[in-house]
Image (cartoon, rainbow, N blue to C red):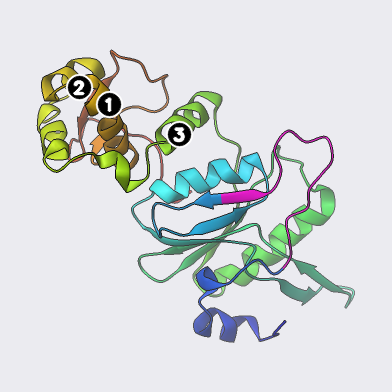
Amino acid sequence: MVQQRWADAALAVAFEDLPPVSAFPAVPGRRWGPGLWWSATTGRHVAAGSNAMRLQLMVLDRAPEVTALAGRPVRLLWRNHRGDVRSWVPQLFARYTDGTALLADCPGHPDAGGERALNAAEAVAEACAHLGWTYRRLAPLDDILAANLKWLAGYRHPRNAGRPGLMPAVLDAFAQPRPLLQGAEAAGDPVEVLPALFHALWHRQLTTNLDTPLHEQVLVGPAQSRNGLDRTGGRR
């Protein structure tokens, strides 16, 4: 373990390339434990400690301004007002295209972690602000949005883009917003087209409103459309 001044480390260290500084705990009785998330942004795995964190990784993995992700790559240490040493390991790190970064925790509910987590959030937010970075306790996702992201995430791998020539046909079929299944049928056999369509939605080549359930009549449109179809992702 190497210790550096925070300001120096932030400039010199590629946190996105580091393994977790400590393992995510496995809590008996929980339905979902630590695991790995394959990032479509980097083509590498990211350690995830909970279902709530995995969902936030999905949001960031789709965000066009995010270039890299990592789980628990850094521990911050500081002294509180009494001079006592305190430390905290944010769950998630994301690098943005402008070189700045996000440190985040992914609580399952607003009070998760208790007073210690809330005090740490203040200290880490202040440390990040000095660098032009951001710290957030990311709010849990709406159930519908979470379900839609889970579905589309299953098609994020490049293999779902399909055979050569298929993706251009899919994008052309939705040059104007139209119902999902109608456009899929216009592009070819839906059995072949739908994986490519969902792949395009994950990668924002096509857009839809993910705040409502995905179904065959949901409107899908081109990425450059200004009709507000896709309302997820980005900095929060």
Q: Amino acid at mark 2?
A: Ala
> Nearer the observer, disc 3 or disc 2?
2
- Separation of marks 1 and 2 at Cα, in angstroms: 6 Å
Left or right, 29 with reference to 191: right
Q: Quadrant of residue 128?
A: bottom right
Residue corresponding to mark 2: 184
Measured as percent of width and height from the top left, residue 194 is found at 27, 26
Can residue 228 be seen here?
no
Residue at the image position 70 percent from the left and 58 percent from the top:
121
Q: What are the residue bounds of the magenta stretch? A: 22-36
The answer to whether the residue labelled 1 contacts the one labelled 2, judged by CB atoms less than 8 Å apart, is yes
- Separation of marks 1 and 3 at Cα, in angstroms: 16 Å
> Nearer the observer, disc 1 or disc 3?
1
Residue 76 vs 196, above or below: the answer is below
Q: Of callouts 3 and 2, which one flags the residue occurring earlier in the amino acid sequence?
A: 3
**Viewer-side residue, 117 vs 61:** 61
Rendered image: mark on residue 194: 1
Residue corresponding to mark 3: 149
- Separation of marks 3 and 2 at Cα, in angstroms: 20 Å
Q: Of callouts 1 and 3, which one flags the residue occurring earlier in the amino acid sequence?
A: 3
**Number of numbered markers:** 3
Residue 127 part of the magenta-drawn span = no
Q: Quadrant of residue 46?
A: bottom right
Q: Helix or strand or loop: what does disc 3 sit on?
A: helix
Residue at the image position 65 percent from the left and 57 percent from the top:
91
